[in-house]
Amino acid sequence: MKGFSRQFGTRYFSLALATFFLLVSCAAVAFGQAETGQINGKVTDPNGAVVPGATVTVKSVSTTAERTATADSDGVYLVTNLQPGLYDVTVKGGSFTASTQRVEVTPGARVSLESKLGIQTIAGEVNVVAAAGVEVNTSSQELSNVVSSAQIRELPTNTRDPYALVNLSGNVNEDPIGDRGTGFSINGQRSASTDVLLDGGENVDNFTTLVGQRIPLDAVGEFRIITSNFSAEYGRASGGIVNVSTRGGSNDFHGTGYEFSRVSRLASNGFDNNARGNPRGNFTRNQFGYSLGGPIKKNKLFFFSSTEWTRVRSQANLVFLVPASQLIAASNSRTQAIFTGQSLTGTPTGRVFTVAQVCANLGLSPTGAFCTLAGSTPALAEIRRSIPTDAGGGVPQNTYSTSNRIDWNFSSKTQIYGRYAIESLDRAIGSNGNSPWAGFDTGSSDFNQNAIINATHTFSFPRPS
């Protein structure tokens, strides 16, 4: 009876474990397929005839994680849920010489291969199949562009924002306001109609439609901009998809340390300031951080971490129009009560607009209560005030963002990774809302968190006899 209990317990544990991985795999298919890629191919012999039952091994170049598949009776195979990166695809079948091809899998890519087995061995032969900048999926007619890791790290961006590189794609126009989506309209749609994915999960603030959370530029592996004919698996968007994947560790240690600085001393004054006689604003923008990735245990466990800090100090003179004391004195007593005890924080410029000037400039009705006042009555006074604001280097802020990831080759059939990201923003008092009256300046703060766990398991079933 004791042996039966032990055997039953082992079977129960195996069944529970298999059920867990099945659920995780199904979840990955349902929600994570947009971030991972797949390789499908056909195996043929030197004469072009299909080779059924060929063994296909897909091996990650950076982590040596392997996935296997078997070609069906038509010589066709499919390997899904592959993390973006380089892979060696080795095909073996019958007495033929094995074929190896190196393939780049990008976020959401469907890579098609034609694997031809040979008779004679050619030493060291590796065919390289690289991803193109512009890709057309011939089965779904999906049109997209891939922004590579080299482009992300080497092309200059004004604020080290990876989403600024969306403009590299075709069929994309910059939004002049830039307060929706990634700041670009895709496929002729509004910029708010863009969906943003981070490691397969939606990364959009549904209230503002802006990017929900940003991560350091050095933590971005690559991303795909889908501009047309994308399938329903992405959801929500009618314009385009920006599909971002984060970097993982490898068997080699790699890292960066950096500091980027922008100062107003090297910038010119703006047109509006020159027109109003305002001096150039003062700002200093510093962005500094690091990235580091490598093995915890070679071929098994890997890490990647990146953190970036942003410090912006910025002041500029803004011009306000406030009610003149003579206008307040001529107003209703309840209006006067509103201004009682209030003090101005700016400096008068000496410029004053009379009632007659305001009525003429705004085209107000001459029979209205305001325009029936004496035309020479001072109505609006101009004051100038220096406040924390964007003077060319961004909103005054203390910000940091971090992304940390662990990849685990649990076995030849199971790969797991987890990623946790934080974005903390603290904007200076007066940068979010400001007033020439004391006590009405406001700042703002945000604290965003984003986490994902992904597990992929390959199930093997015996072929029917």
Image (spheres, grey):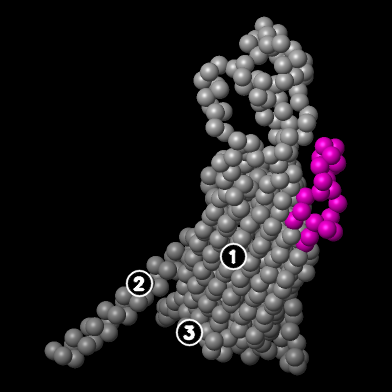
- SS for tag 1? strand
In this rendered view, identify the residue nearer to me: 263 or 210: 263
Kind of residue sitting beneath label 3 = Ser
Lower position in the chain sequence, tag 2 or tag 1: 2
Kindly report the distance in space between the C-alpha atoms of the residues bearing marks 3 and 2: 17 Å
Residue 411 disc label: 3
Q: Is residue 41 left or right of residue 236?
A: right
Residue 19 disc label: 2
Quadrant of the image containing the N terminus: bottom left
Residue contact between numbered discs 2 and 1, judged by CB atoms under 8 Å: no
User: What percent of the width, then of the height, locates residue 141?
Assistant: 68, 54
User: What percent of the width, then of the height, locates residue 67?
Assistant: 55, 80
Residue 282: name its quadrant: bottom right
| Residue 345 part of the magenta-drawn span | no
Would residue 234 be visible to someone looking at this image?
Answer: no
Quadrant of the image containing the C terminus: bottom left
Lower position in the chain sequence, tag 3 or tag 2: 2
Kind of residue sitting beneath label 1 = Ser
- SS for tag 2? helix
Residue 401 disc label: 1
Kindly report the distance in space between the C-alpha atoms of the residues bearing marks 2 and 1: 37 Å
Q: Which residues are magenta?
A: 262-283
Residue contact between numbered discs 3 and 2, judged by CB atoms under 8 Å: no
Q: Measured along the vertical axis of the image, is residue 101 above or below residue 389?
A: below
Q: Is residue 293 left or right of residue 14?
A: right
Would residue 455 be visible to someone looking at this image?
Answer: yes
Q: Measured along the vertical axis of the image, is residue 437 above or below residue 182?
A: above
Kind of residue sitting beneath label 2 = Thr
Q: Measured along the vertical axis of the image, is residue 376 above or below residue 439?
A: above
